Image (spheres, rainbow, N blue to C red):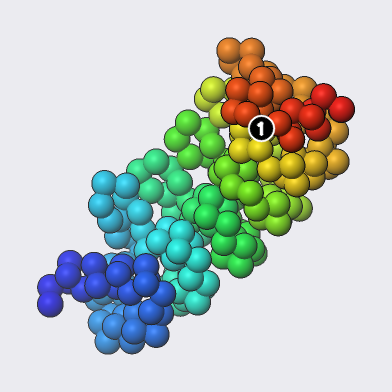
Amino acid sequence: MSLEEQEKHILKLIQEGRFHLCQEALQRSPMLLARLPGRHFGRSGDTVLHYAARHGHLPALSYLLEVVGMDVGVRNNDYKTALHEAASMGHRACLLHLLSKGAAVDSLKKADWTPLMMACTRRNVDVIKDLIEHKADPKLKNKDGWNCFHIASREGDPAVITYLLDTFPDIWKTESKIKRTPLHTAAMHGCLDVVQILLER
């Protein structure tokens, strides 16, 4: 098997969560182990660290950071980090591990999306709380002028909306570049529960 084929094999094992087979393959090939940290795959330019975070495989993630020596802040072609992936997919254990290893909580991917914004696309209040507790800035805006509260208003989870309002009472006072408020956004997307919460506020 060529080195490139071996790399693709490692990537498949990480995606499938077969960490022990991955570890064995890397231990057998020092050259493969040395090449892996700088290797980006496909059009997205993801690294194996991105894949481990996206699929929620904590043992692989930990091994890649602590044994292979991968950079916790490595970016793909969209400037996404592994923290963006873990936040987006709701993999809390991976997210907390990345933060404990120094991942930048407010790192920006293309279009200026933070991990907190990515987390707000899902109905996972625990991941959002974790990011806030690690000092994520909820008032940062993306290229369209949306902050995380706009995004949460679009998704329509009352638990997320209530948590953000309880933690940051003025977070609803924001407009996008086209003057759209979170209330506009919630109404446009038919999120009645969020509309009612916002009107009560």
Camera-nearest residue between 8 and 125: 125
Query: Is 199 positioned to the left or the right of 42 in the image?
Result: right
The residue located at (33%, 74%) in the rendering is: 13
* Residue 199, above or below 5: above
Query: Is 35 positioned to the left or the right of 142 in the image?
Result: left
The residue located at (45%, 64%) in the rendering is: 55
Q: How many numbered discs?
A: 1
Characterize the local packing of mark 1: few (<14), some (14-19) or many (20 or more) Cα atoms within 10 angstroms: some
- The residue pinned by badge 1 equals 191
Asked whether residue 135 appears in the rendered view, the answer is no
Residue 27 image offset from top left, x and y in percent: 33, 85
* Residue 175 location, quadrant: top right
Quadrant where the C terminus sits is top right
Quadrant where the N terminus sits is bottom left
The residue located at (61%, 32%) in the rendering is: 154
Asked whether residue 11 appears in the rendered view, the answer is yes
The residue located at (42%, 49%) in the rendering is: 75
Query: Is 114 positioned to the left or the right of 195 in the image?
Result: left
Residue 10 image offset from top left, x and y in percent: 29, 73
Q: Secondary structure at mark 1?
A: loop
* Residue 27, above or below 55: below
Name the outermost residue toward the top.
Answer: 178
Query: Is 122 positioned to the left or the right of 60 in the image?
Result: right
* Residue 69 location, quadrant: bottom left
The amino acid type found where label 1 is placed reads Cys
Residue 155 image offset from top left, x and y in percent: 61, 38
Residue 29 image offset from top left, x and y in percent: 25, 82
* Residue 67, above or below 4: below
